[in-house]
Amino acid sequence: MAASTDQGAKQRSVEFLSDGITIRGVLRLPSGEGPFPIVILGHGLGALKEWTIPEVVDALVGVGIAGLSFDYRNVGDSDGLPRDEVSHHGRIEDWRSAISYASSLTDIDPGEIGIWGTSLGGRDVLALAALDRRVKAVLAQTPVIKWHAALAARMAGYGDNLDRYQRELADDHKNRTLGKEPRYVPFVKPTGDDVKDGYIKQMTKEELRNYTGRLTLQTYQPTSMIDVIPLVKMIAPTPLRFVLAEQDFLPGQREAYDAANEPKSLIMIEGHHFSPYMTSKDNATFAAKEFFAQYLLHK
């Protein structure tokens, strides 16, 4: 993690409840006296709060904005079973609980809360901003928009074999209703290149301490994903920023941006889906700092 430009910044581990499940995260506060505006940050599918997010938090803290990052239920430092299962509806509740927790803190201004999400976390924040008016600014970075069966099959490692994917998904669901253990699949890249592997290889041992490299097969159940585009239309008047990569493989991102009402802004960066964490990290981080400074600090 890069050193913060705010040498007086304070950091502490935190925990709060979401549906009775303990969610754990890290709160970082700027130097000086609060209350401070805050940005809550959420990671993507198969990722953890230690991945890239600390650099974004450092940039925010450097301009006087607090940052709260957390692991969703079932992954990383947070509790929840089955382990390594992404609960799409549960993630939204975890976000709502994070906002409630942050707004309860005496050193946080509950009227100045922003949310930042990347990849699947980007989808989360789009849905949340439409439904929770406590959010005063939202940034979606390379968001997952259209989670259809063909994409889910590729991400689960089935390639184009949609029939086998759907059959094994149904078999696993039946087995779990009978009390059997969930089936796990490797967390694999949905494209033919090695960009995800390259991203993971650059991480430190600390960043990978909770990484298992697997997800439950039911994580990739497409019917659990709501259509987010109608919700995007409901975000206004909350300010919205999209940060998209020129060669991202995920469909529907520009369609979602075009569906949003003003105020909104679009930042394009070079590269692919993982470039905001790699070659285009500085540009993506600046886009977040600039946006939240404008709408939470009103500069």
Image: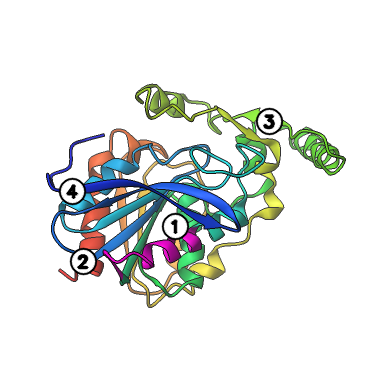
How far across and how far down the image is residue 17, in percent?
52, 56
- C-alpha gap between disc 2 and disc 3: 43 Å
The C terminus appears in which quarter of the rendering? Answer: bottom left
Q: Is residue 231 above or below residue 152?
A: below
Name the kind of residue labelled 1 in the image: Arg
Q: Earlier in the sequence, mark 4 or mark 3?
A: 4
Amino acid found under the numbered disc labelled 3: Tyr
Which tag is nearer the camera, tag 3 or tag 1? 3
- Magenta span of residues: 95-109
Residue assigned mark 4: 9
Q: Residues within 10 Å of mark 1 (few under 14, many from 20)?
A: few
- Tag 4: amino acid: Ala
**Residue at mark 2:** 294
Marks 2/1: CA–CA distance: 23 Å
Residue in the picture at 80% in, 42% down: 173
| Callout in the foreground (2, 4) | 4
Q: CA distance from mark 1 to mark 4?
A: 37 Å
Position of residue 75 in the picture relative to residue 237 (left or right): right
Q: In the image, is 220 to the left or to the right of 199?
A: right
Mark 1 lies on residue: 254
Disc 2 or 3, which lies upstream in sequence? 3
* Mark found first going from the N terminus, 3 or 1: 3
Residue 231 in picture, x, y percent from top left: 53, 69
Distance CA(mark 2)–CA(mark 4): 21 Å
Which residue is at the front of the view, 88 or 98?
98
**Residue 195, picture quadrant:** top left
Q: Residue at x 21, y 66 (%)?
A: 294
Pointer 3 residue = 184
Q: Is residue 247 left or right of residue 157?
A: left
Mark 1 or mark 4: whose residue is earlier in sequence: 4
